[in-house]
Structures are given as structure tokens and as C-alpha cells.
Image (cartoon, rainbow, N blue to C red):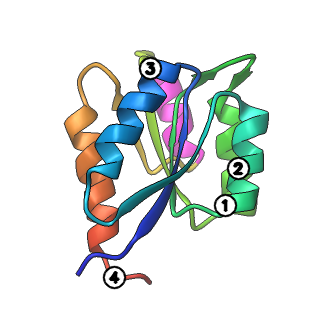
């Protein structure tokens, strides 16, 4: 059975935010509750909306996704973090995974896998 999951999208590209919003809202059980283009805005939205998941870019406007990941792991540890980025550096990927990101997806290759991860989250019973 599907449960309704709440997702916040965090990316400095309005085009990417729009595409992600449309694609994820079309999925059963998924509701995009907020968007942010920089770390400060993202942290405010996460604190206010308490989402089940965030889709997070590594590079944000005047900031980094790293700051958002650190905030989530400290103050909202049950929130799932799906990194969705053009960042190709394996060192960056390892750093985010070791710091607690649930998954790391390449924007140009892994959009279907991101959607599958979010569908999987919506299809699981709450713990």
C-alpha cells in the first residue's frame, strides 16, 4: 500500500526544479511540498515542512548541498536524502554517502533510478 510522502526539491536550476516537480507529482503517493535554490532556503523549508525526503543538488546558488545534508542528519535524521547532481567526482560521491546521503544519482543518467527510489519510499509501510 502506498503512503503519501512529502518531498522537498533543492536545486539552483529553476528548469530542473520544474521538471522534477512535474515528474514526481505524477507519481502515486508523492507530494512535492517545497522547493529551494540555496542552502539557507532549503534548511528553512526542511525545518518548517519536515519532509519525508529531499532531492538535493551538490552545487546550490551561493552555497553547497553539503550544508543541507549536515543539517538534515543532525536535526531531521529520519528524512531521506537523495543527491541528484551533475557532479561526477567519485570523491564527492563518497563524501556525501559516508555523511549519510541515502543515494547519489547523476542528473544525466539516473533520473529513472531517482524516481524508482522515491516510489520505493512511498510503497513501504511507515516504520
- For marks 3 and 4, give the CA distance: 32 Å
- Residue 30 at x, y percent in the picture: 36, 60
Q: Which callout, 4 or 1, points at the residue further toward the start of the chain?
A: 1
Q: Are marks 1 and 3 in contact (CB under 8 Å)?
A: no
Q: Are marks 2 and 1 in contact (CB under 8 Å)?
A: yes
In the rendered image, which residue does mark 2 sit on? 45
Verify whether residue 98 appears in magenta.
yes
Secondary structure beneath label 3: helix
Q: Looking at the image, which residue is at 70% across and 28% down?
A: 38
Secondary structure beneath label 2: helix
- Mark number displayed over residue 15: 3
Verify whether residue 47 appears in magenta.
no
Q: Quadrant of residue 42?
A: top right
- For marks 4 and 1, give the CA distance: 21 Å
In the rendered image, which residue does mark 1 sit on? 49
Any part of residue 117 in sight: yes
- Residue 34 at x, y percent in the picture: 58, 48
Instruction: Give the magenta range.
Output: 90-99
Secondary structure beneath label 1: helix
Q: Quadrant of residue 78?
A: bottom right
Q: Which callout, 3 or 2, points at the residue further toward the start of the chain?
A: 3
In the rendered image, which residue does mark 4 sit on? 125
Q: Looking at the image, which residue is at 45% across and 17% down?
A: 87
Q: In what quadrant of the picture does the C terminus appear?
A: bottom left
- For marks 4 and 2, give the CA distance: 25 Å
Amino acid at each position: 500500500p502506498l503512503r503519501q510522502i512529502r518531498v522537498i526539491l533543492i536545486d539552483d536550476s529553476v528548469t530542473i526544479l520544474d521538471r522534477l516537480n512535474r515528474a514526481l507529482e505524477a507519481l502515486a503517493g508523492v507530494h512535492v511540498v517545497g522547493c529551494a535554490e540555496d542552502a539557507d532556503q532549503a534548511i528553512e523549508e526542511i525545518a518548517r515542512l519536515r519532509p519525508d525526503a529531499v532531492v538535493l543538488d551538490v552545487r546550490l546558488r551561493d552555497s553547497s548541498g553539503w550544508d543541507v545534508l549536515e543539517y538534515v542528519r543532525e536535526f531531521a535524521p529520519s528524512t531521506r536524502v537523495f543527491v541528484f547532481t551533475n557532479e561526477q567526482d567519485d570523491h564527492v560521491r563518497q563524501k556525501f554517502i559516508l555523511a549519510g546521503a541515502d543515494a547519489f544519482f547523476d542528473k544525466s543518467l539516473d533520473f529513472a533510478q531517482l524516481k524508482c527510489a522515491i516510489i520505493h519510499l512511498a510503497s513501504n509501510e511507515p516504520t
